[in-house]
Image (cartoon, helix red, strand yellow):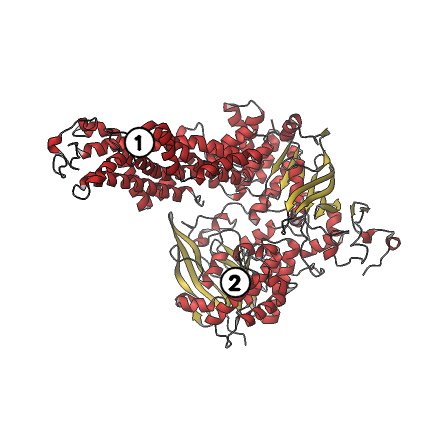
Amino acid sequence: MLAVENLKVHFDVRNNRGVKTKLRAVDGVSLHLKKGEAYGIVGESGSGKSTIGKAVLNLTPKTEGKIEIDGRDITMTNRANEAWLRQNAQIVFQDPHSALNPRMTIMRSVAEPIIVHTKTRGHDLRRRVEELLDIVGLSKQFIYRYPHELSGGQKQRVCIARAIALEPSLLILDEPTSALDVSVQSQILEFLASLQRDLNLTYLFISHNLSVVRYLCQRVGVMYLGNIIEEGTTKTVFEHPQHPYTKALLGAIPYPGATQPQSAPPLIGDIPSPVDLPVGCRFHTRCPVKVANLCDRLAPEHHHQTLGWASCHLLDPDLDKIGGKPE
Amino acid sequence: MVGSTNQRTNLATVMLIQDSNEDHASESFADRHASTYRTLRLYARTFRRNTSAMFGLAIVVVFLVVAAIGPWIVPFPEDATGAVHLDIKLQPPDSTHWFGTDEVGNDIFTRVVLGTRTTLQIACIVTGVAMLIGVPLGMIAGLVGGWVQEAIMRVTDVFLSVPGLVLAIAIVGALGPGIVNAMLALSLVWWPGYVRLVQAKTLALKNEIYVQAAYSIGASKLRIVFIHILPNCTSPIIVKASMDMGMAILGAASLGFLGLGAQPPFPEWGAMISIARTYLPDWWWYSFFPGLAISLTVLGFNLLGDGLRDILDPRHRD
Amino acid sequence: MPDKPILSFIDFKLNFDTFDGVYQAIDGISFDLNPGESLGIVGETGCGKSVTAKSIMGLLPSPPAEVAGGGIWFDGRNLLKEKSSTLKSIRGNEISMIFQDPMTYLNPVFTIGKQIVDVILAHQKRGNHGRSLSSKQAFQYGMELLDKVHLPNPRRQMKSYPHELSGGMRQRVLIAMALSGQPKLLIADEPTTALDVTIQAQILELISELREQLNLSVIMITHDLGVVATVCDRVLVMYAGQIVEDASIKQLFNNPSHPYTRGLLQAVPDPAKPNKKLKGIPGALPNLLNPPIGCRFQTRCSSASEKCTRMPALHEIRTNQKVACWNVGTA
């Protein structure tokens, strides 16, 4: 359904000292999603997760990489591809409060994709918008309201209605519930789960919240500084994480229960800037189990387990041959 | 059709449905625009609480009415077209001549009232033309970026680096005095301000998520400009325009004062003060009343502009 | 013999005077904070948790905000009745506060060092530390504070500007500044909401560590039940300006009693139970311009009845657990 090969998105920026340098937001990411699957991308700031979503939809120019959606190669940005892309893949943004034009009624916001790509107008258009609002669980009376009259959860439903208006096959969800209250989050998540089943959508779900990803997605990729460092089924990654970063990330989640599960102490140090990437394994600056003279020199490869892989030297069966002992 | 009826019912049971009891067979115009009414009512209410803004609005309305009905209420309409009554020249204000008479016996009240029309006309046209030129240029600069933006902004900078009035005087000087040339000159001096404002606002709006959302839906650039960016630019433009009216009035009066605007016997406040100057301080009423008119209109527009700014940005919290 | 509480809210009511009427933000809340205790205040948007915290420090601007009753007692004094000069001397010295977004609370044009020294010197003028510091000594003290919050290379950080620091580091600087007056009570208003998960874990651990070292009392305001479980001993659950449950961490998570608390816990994914179906809470927050009489949760509660129009008091149903609900325990 979605095939991304070696995607790279680099920006030209100036660092603190004014020197021109490259910000490697996404630095060689490959994804393969099956139709009807929900794939989660997890990461913290600087991981590049949001950029991937935008790059797949060509909202951010890509530096390198091949993208194929539903069998069609859309790597080249020409008019035909653009038009096809917009009708077949959509995105739901993080902040529902700013994702809707404050001067447009709900009717116009949701109708916009239909107006742009089809000739449906008048009564038929109105009926279609009402149908969409019904699917997302909003009553028809919202149709002529303005965004500022709706709550956060309702606005996000409107954004979802807009995104599914043209019946896309791929839906990219960029932190769709992060800006919402807990009780509303759960409603939207439940809704997204059933929507996926009913419309047979493929989801690329981007989030920093691992518990939410676990709830909704079948497979997950953990990102750090522009690379996916571990990938696998949700169950495997959460129950048997391989990469030290994944372990730290899971251990850092505050657990809403009477006793906290045993976990390692928090990682020391800050997330490096994507402008100034560490040499070798990008995680070595904060890694509690790094191998001297190896992790800081050489980037690790993907080491496959049964249901996934992780890129860490410690998983390499030939570790002693490369040189260096664990600390 | 998306999904069958069965599927939709399943979805409905899982979701939150608010106020689904309302029934709408058909909606009237009022229903459809209920939200707009609500928003306008909120604006009106906020505005009403602002006493200085209401004061400004009152002044502006008074002058607009005077400009509209002027020719029909003035006691001595011929005094605006060159009648001369030397026998009653320089009379102080009294019951016939409320503002007194000038050096050719013309009723100053008549001339001030008729001058209102001229002044407001000039101010409106100047502001209007400036917006017509400046707003599109600003949006193009903000949206296209690159060398087009650089070119537009540098030309704007050049215009802004010369003091406005001096430039206007130079232009009128080259073209010759007269109302039309004065308006042309002032317009040419005014448009750069709008370019700056609109360019900044467009740049900010480009990064708004709903604009990105519009791209992701596949909206054409033209559509994005007219439907997403322009309507959200109107607030600062409206505020600036109302403040600008005051400055435009001053500009017109200044040109008139220098003899570069309306030519006598055309009643124009600045021109009147120019002559009245020589009759100070003994025949004070000659310069006082046109001067008062200028001050009041400028004050009115400034207060109105302030009030509008308070209700238009920052946006209301919901 | 139990210690006297260091902070007590007694039937505190607060309103906001707005265009559209009187917004009844806080409806008579009462709770105690014991010395050395870490109390969490949990709730969603609009529940009044931030307003509660800011009321302690007197940070709410008084024309819109109006105290409508009750008192806030700190160290034997009613903070609501004190003069503003007394409040100023308490702020930063005896009670300190850290906020959500560290970038907006640090002045971008001054170095960290200048800002910390400013704070230190300002407190010593108003507080009563018994020692008068010179700028040099204040600088030294500043570096000690930065070290205490585990900021690497304090000397260098004193000379940096806020934008050169990461979010986690800035929050540490704010914590250092909050500690400079040697406060007895630290109020933290969503201090980690804007931070990444791994950084959040560091900051929470720091707060726990400092609390033990300095015997601080802490009030932690958050919407995240996980954060509360990690750092707090006790938690208050607030809804629409009322406290609905007041329990120890153990009791709250093992025996959630108030319908709202249970709704919240059902809405949060549980890492230990990945297959749990998430359930939201139907309905919406009541309009506090015209709130329901009595319990404000009744409009969304499945077990609401006639008696809910009288607000139930917080009553103890178990050791270390109080609930405000007619349907739980004996009222």
| B195, C199: nearer the viewer | B195
| B176, C281: nearer the viewer | B176
Give the vertical position of C161 relative to A46 (above or below): below
Mark number for residue C97? 2
Most extreme residue toward the front is B174
At which x and y percent is residue B181? 35, 28
- The residue that disc 1 covers is B261
At which x and y percent is residue C106? 53, 58
Q: Residue at x 84, y 51 (%)?
A: A316
Question: Dividing the image into 4 quarters, which one contains the C terminus of chain B?
Answer: top left
What chain does mark 1 sit on?
B
Q: Amino acid at mark 1?
A: Gly
Could you classify mark 2 by the number of other residues whose Cα lies within 10 Å: few (under 14), some (14-19), or many (20 or more)? many
| C124, C79: nearer the viewer | C124
Question: Dividing the image into 4 quarters, which one contains the N terminus of chain B?
Answer: top right
At which x and y percent is residue B118? 28, 30
| C91, A324: nearer the viewer | A324
Q: Give the distance between the C-alpha atoms of the residues marked 1 and 2, in whole angstroms.
A: 63 Å
What chain does mark 2 sit on?
C
- Secondary element at image label 1: loop
- Secondary element at image label 2: strand
